[in-house]
Amino acid sequence: MKELANSFAELAAIIMILITLAVSTAVISQWASGDANQASQAQPLMISGR
C-alpha cells in the first residue's frame, strides 16, 4: 500500500513539473510573439514616415 502511495506521489510530482513546463513555455512564446508583433507594427510606421 505504501508503494502505491509513493508511486502516486511520484506521478503527481511529474504531472506538476509537466504542467509548470507547459505554462512557462506558453508564457515565453506569448512574450516572444508580443515582441515580434510590436516590431512588425513599428516597421510600417517608420517606412511611411520617410
Image (cartoon, grey):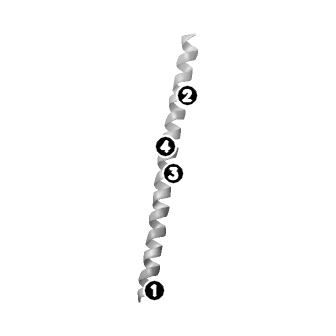
Q: Earlier in the sequence, mark 3 or mark 4?
A: 3
Image mark for residue 38: none
Nearest the viewer among 39 and 11 is: 11
Q: Residues within 10 Å of mark 1 (few under 14, many from 20)?
A: few
Residue drawn 47% across and 74% down?
A: 11
Q: Which residue is labeled 4 in the image?
A: 30
* Residue depicted at 44% across the width and 78% down the height: 8
Tag 4 near tag 2, CB within 8 Å: no
Q: Earlier in the sequence, mark 4 or mark 1?
A: 1
Q: Which residue is mark 2?
A: 40
Classify 11 as above or below 4. above
Up-down: is 15 above or below 24? below
Secondary structure at badge 4 equals: helix
In primary-sequence order, the first of circles 3 and 1 is 1
CA distance separating discs 1 and 2: 55 Å
Q: Pick whichever of labels 4 and 2 is earlier in the sequence.
A: 4
Residue 42 point in image, percent of width and height: 52, 23
- What distance separates the C-alpha of mark 3 from that of mark 4? 8 Å
Residue nearest the observer in this picture, 31 or 5: 5
- Report the quarter where the C terminus lies: top right
Distance Cα–Cα, label 3 vs label 1: 33 Å
In this view, the residue farthest toward the top is 50
Residue labelled with disc 3: 25
Q: Which residue is mark 1?
A: 3
Residue 1 sits in quarter: bottom left
Q: Is residue 49 above or below residue 22?
A: above
Which sits in the foreground, 49 or 12? Answer: 12
Residue 36 horizontal side relative to residue 23, left or right? right
Quick check: marks 3 and 4 in contact, CB under 8 Å? no
Q: Evaluate if marks 2 and 3 touch, with contact meaning CB atoms under 8 Å apart.
A: no
